[in-house]
């Protein structure tokens, strides 16, 4: 071998063995770090490699251990910035120091600002504050122990271009904190997952006190078992959708049921908000595909212009057509149906709206006490409530279920909390419990366990927790359901009352009886802010 080739090979081998320094995803451009506490910067490199870290005038170094892990701790910083963080050849820009919070729980913590714009559209559009930022932890669960990092995702700022993606509750919390706390930057790491149960957020260490939960984890740790079961369940669902889509009458006739020319004169008439069109005479649900159609005329002043179609919420899923043109779809029951109608689509006479409703389980229906109308640019409206025509496209059994693996004990702790354990947080905002109303009598103990567990894992025995009380929900006629929800609030309150530096944020006085995701996130957000500002400092 020629000398030059030998040297090139040796250099290539050396470079391959000297892995580049890598920082965790959360330590990326725009990060906010906790002020006035020692600053831990950590990551990976080649074993034995020296890593030099610098922020502002402060410097530190560490040597990567045998596993390639390293940590550098710098002295505390006052609130402010921006700074540049360097770790060897890695650069992180626009670093601020302020107050950093961990937000966690389920969908009401995850719910984005975009779902609250009925109340706050102008306010959000006119607010511009780059000193408030959120890192939304990617949804990742892990069966085989705590993870050290998550997938890369950017820090978002409370500016109009990013704000709609913020978690709504922490967005309003942070805004209020910023104004009442001397304009100190506010950061949120939002590690939440809609529908998650509290058990998923406990570490395996904490599960030692809950053998049934621990053993349920042990049962599904086997990757091959989960893969085989998931494959079978996916196959079952694929067959369900295949039959429903390929054999339903609305797709197989001479005219599809979304087209205006279809003769629907023999379809049965129902009020849009009736619950009867999705049931058999004995009251049992008709799952499968249903169609709803409405013929209507418009004033000339409302034709040929863009509009917004509001259909409230629909159980379970829908596709919507106006005059034969597809205008939108929603895959599950909770999001509000808000569809843009292109200009020139609406005419003065003989408009037809067709809704293809997919019912997976339970009785399909259109949720009451929601907006069901067309809204035009000049703020005029056209109501769509009243009589509609209905026909069942195909009757099906309930959709085959699937395992929600993210509901397994510990797996969300492993995937979404453990990677953040090196970060000092000012406190935790916890909004969860809707999925655990059925275990409300056990919830107090589980909540106390979670607080104890996280304080231990974060090595912060006095870390404050702010538990957001479940909002008001369910119709006043649902006496048993409302009683269960109140018992859940009582469990939350007891957990807070009996645990030092845990605070219950009142929220049961607001909500929407027909929406588990109430749009008013400003009220609880500002209440969390008030609780934080009044939390006594430790000596």
Image (tube, rainbow, N blue to C red):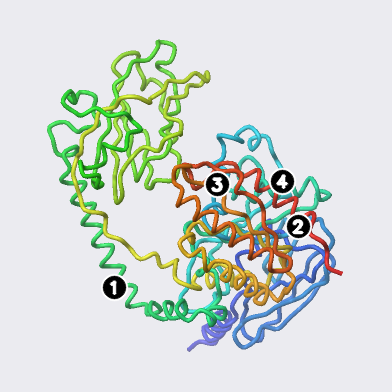
Q: Quadrant of residue 82?
A: bottom right
Question: How far apart are labels 1 and 3 at the CA level?
Answer: 41 Å
The disc, 4 or 1, on the residue closer to the chain's N-terminal end is 4
Q: Which mark is residue 139?
A: none
Name above or below for residue 461 compared with residue 342.
below
Mark 2 or 1: in front is: 1
In percent of width and height, residue 67 lies at 59, 85
Q: Secondary structure at mark 2?
A: strand
- Residue at x 24%, y 52% (from the top left corner): 241
Precedes in sequence: disc 4 or disc 2: 2
In this rendering, position of residue 473 left or right of residue 124: left
Is residue 495 depicted above or below 185 in this figure?
below
Q: Secondary structure at mark 4?
A: helix
Tally the numbered discs: 4
Residue nearest the viewer, comparing 282 with 231: 282
Neighbours of disc 1 within 10 Å: few (<14), some (14-19), many (20+): few
Q: Identify the residue under disc 3.
A: 472
Relative to 289, is 346 on the left or the right?
Answer: right
Depth check: give the residue in front, 437 or 59.
437
Tell me the quarter of the image containing the C terminus: bottom right
Image spot of residue 28 (x, y percent) = 65, 61
Bin the neighbour count of mark 2 within 10 Å (Cα to Cα): few under 14, some 14-19, many 20 and up: many
Q: Can you identify the residue that label 2 sits on?
A: 96
Relative height, residue 41 to residue 286 (above, below): below
Q: Which residue is mark 1?
A: 228
Residue at point 31%, 31% (across, down): 321
Residue tagged by mark 4? 175
Report the Cα–Cα distance between label 3 and label 4: 24 Å
Q: Looking at the image, which residue sits at the far top?
A: 300
Residues 97 and 529: in front is 529
Mark 2 / mark 1, whichever is N-terminal: 2
């Amino acid at each position: 071998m020629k000398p030059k080739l030998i040297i090139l090979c040796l250099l290539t081998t050396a470079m391959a063995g000297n892995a580049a320094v890598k920082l965790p995803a959360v330590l990326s451009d725009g990060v906010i770090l906790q002020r006035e506490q020692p600053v831990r910067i950590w990551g990976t490199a080649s074993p034995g490699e020296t890593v030099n870290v610098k922020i502002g005038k402060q410097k530190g170094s560490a040597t990567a251990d045998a596993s390639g892990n390293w940590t550098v701790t710098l002295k505390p910083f006052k609130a402010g910035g921006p700074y540049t963080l360097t770790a060897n050849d890695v650069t992180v820009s626009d670093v601020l120091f302020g107050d950093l919070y961990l937000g966690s729980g389920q969908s009401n913590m995850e719910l984005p600002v975009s779902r609250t714009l009925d109340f706050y559209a102008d306010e959000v559009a006119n607010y511009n504050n780059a000193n408030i930022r959120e890192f939304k932890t990617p949804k990742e669960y892990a069966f085989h122990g705590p993870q050290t990092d998550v997938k890369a995702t950017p820090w978002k700022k409370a500016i109009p271009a990013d704000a709609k993606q913020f978690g709504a509750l922490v967005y309003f919390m942070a805004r209020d904190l910023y104004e009442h706390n001397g304009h100190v930057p506010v950061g949120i790491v939002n590690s939440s997952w809609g529908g998650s149960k509290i058990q998923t957020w406990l570490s395996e260490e904490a599960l030692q006190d809950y053998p049934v939960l621990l053993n349920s984890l042990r049962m599904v740790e086997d990757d091959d078992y989960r893969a085989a079961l998931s494959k079978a369940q996916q196959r079952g669902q694929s067959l369900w959708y295949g039959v429903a889509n390929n054999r339903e009458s609305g797709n197989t006739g001479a005219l599809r049921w979304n087209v205006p020319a279809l003769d629907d004169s023999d379809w049965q008439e129902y009020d849009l908000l009736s619950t009867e069109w999705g049931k058999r005479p004995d009251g049992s649900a008709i799952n499968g595909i249903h169609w709803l159609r409405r013929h209507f005329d418009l004033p000339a002043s409302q034709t040929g212009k863009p509009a917004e179609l509001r259909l409230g919420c629909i159980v379970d899923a829908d596709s919507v057509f106006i005059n034969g043109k597809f205008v939108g779809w929603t895959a599950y029951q909770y999001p509000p149906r808000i569809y843009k109608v292109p200009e020139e689509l609406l005419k003065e006479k003989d408009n037809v709206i067709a809704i293809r409703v997919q019912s997976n389980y339970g009785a399909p229906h259109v949720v009451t006490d929601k907006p069901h109308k067309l809204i035009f640019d000049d703020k005029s409206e056209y109501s769509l409530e009243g009589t509609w025509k209905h026909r069942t496209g195909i009757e099906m059994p309930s959709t085959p279920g699937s395992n929600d693996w993210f509901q397994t004990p510990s797996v969300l702790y492993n995937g979404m909390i453990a990677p953040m354990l090196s970060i000092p947080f000012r406190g935790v905002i916890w909004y969860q419990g809707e999925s655990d109303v059925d275990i409300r009598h056990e919830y107090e103990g589980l909540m106390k366990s979670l607080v104890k567990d996280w304080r231990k894992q974060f090595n912060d025995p006095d870390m404050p927790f702010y538990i957001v009380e479940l909002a008001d929900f369910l119709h006043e006629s649902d006496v048993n359901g409302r009683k269960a929800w109140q018992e859940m609030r009582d469990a939350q309150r007891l957990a807070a009352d009996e645990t030092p530096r845990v605070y219950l944020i009142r929220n049961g006085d607001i909500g929407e009886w027909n929406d588990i995701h109430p749009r008013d996130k400003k009220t609880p957000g500002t209440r969390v802010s008030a609780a934080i500002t009044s939390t006594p400092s430790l000596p």
